[in-house]
């Protein structure tokens, strides 16, 4: 028998929080934490809290559910819960597993939990490739160009496309940032958040952002924001305390 799903629930309305916790427990889940604001979720994760999935209300004090979906560690499934259907498109752009409308029913929740249980386990990291010159292909009219990674500052995921930023914005052949990471394994890139992959050598400055995030200035006078969860890794790569 497989172990129960261990989940975190965040909802700022006490009645809705209790109800969702009860529904999850009735369907065999272990509720590891039930919190009432977004900042508490990040604090819980950074303190070593472990969950198989996050169930997050979209509208909460501090960080919203959409903010947390972008901040959550890569590979940690997120389910957003809201009374407003208009957030659905943005939710799936953040890579969430499912989007539940309130009031959540037991039948609808069961389908979400089935989807979570059927998700494949995350692959272990591949062995790093040796460092050295590396080029990758981008689309150029009806053909391809090859860009040097050493001249690239970062990659972003927008409109179902991975874009390279290398003195301009170029459409790569990769469909997801996970594919880009796999192709560039061992080249020293760092995940800034779910939609950002950056090259630490291109960083020319940093300053504090909101909620523990970092505002990062890159070569070419570009600025990006690194999530609170990814900030420690980038700081370590930059030799910062």
Image (cartoon, rainbow, N blue to C red):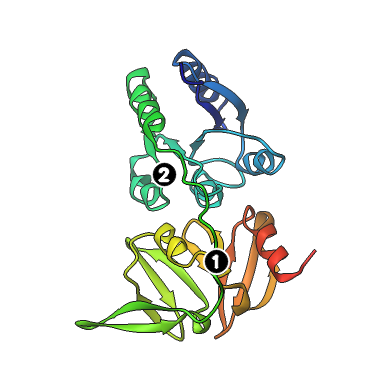
Q: Position of residue 26 (x, y in %)?
A: 47, 13
Q: Is residue 28 left or right of residue 35?
A: left
Residue drawn where x is 42% and y is 36% of the image: 82
Q: Secondary structure at mark 2?
A: loop
Mark number, residue 186: 1
Disc 1 packing (10 Å; few <14; some 14–19; many ≥20): some
Q: Position of residue 126 (x, y in %)?
A: 50, 55
Query: Is residue 163 shown above or below 37?
Result: below
Disc 2 packing (10 Å; few <14; some 14–19; many ≥20): some
Residue furthest to the top in view is 26
Residue 102 appearing in the image? no
Residue 82 appearing in the image? yes
Q: Earlier in the sequence, mark 2 or mark 1?
A: 2
Q: Is residue 17 left or right of residue 106?
A: right
Q: Between marks 2 and 1, how big is the CA–CA gap?
A: 27 Å
Mark number, residue 96: 2
Q: Which image quadrant for residue 238?
A: bottom right
For the C terminus, the quadrant is: bottom right
* CB contact under 8 Å: marks 2 and 1: no
Residue drawn where x is 34% and y is 72% of the image: 172
Query: Is residue 220 shown above or below 171?
Result: below
Residue drawn where x is 56% and y is 51% of the image: 71
Query: Is residue 30 shown above or below 54?
Result: above
Q: Nearer the viewer, residue 46 or 129?
A: 129
Q: Position of residue 229 (x, y in %)?
A: 63, 52
């Amino acid at each position: 028998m497989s172990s129960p799903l261990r989940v975190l629930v965040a909802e700022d309305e006490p009645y809705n929080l209790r109800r969702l916790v009860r529904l999850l427990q009735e369907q065999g889940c272990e509720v590891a934490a039930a919190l009432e604001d977004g900042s508490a979720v990040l604090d819980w994760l950074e303190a070593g809290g472990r969950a198989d999935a996050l169930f997050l209300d979209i509208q909460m004090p501090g960080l919203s559910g959409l903010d947390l979906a972008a901040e959550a560690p890569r590979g940690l499934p997120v389910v957003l819960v809201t009374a407003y259907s208009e957030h659905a498109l943005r939710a799936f752009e953040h890579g969430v597993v499912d989007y539940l409308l309130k009031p959540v029913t037991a039948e609808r929740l069961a389908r979400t939990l089935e989807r979570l249980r059927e998700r494949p386990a995350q692959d272990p990291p591949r062995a790093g490739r040796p460092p050295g010159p590396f080029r990758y292909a981008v689309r150029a009219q009806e053909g391809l160009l090859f860009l040097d990674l050493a001249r690239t500052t970062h990659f972003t995921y927008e409109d179902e496309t991975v874009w390279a930023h290398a003195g301009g914005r170029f459409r790569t052949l990769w469909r997801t940032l996970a594919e880009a990471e796999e192709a560039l394994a061992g080249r020293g890139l760092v995940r800034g958040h779910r939609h950002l992959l950056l090259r630490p050598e291109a960083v020319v400055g940093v300053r504090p952002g909101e909620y523990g995030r970092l505002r990062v200035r890159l070569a070419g006078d570009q600025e990006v924001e690194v999530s609170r969860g990814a900030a420690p890794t980038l700081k370590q790569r930059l030799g910062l305390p």
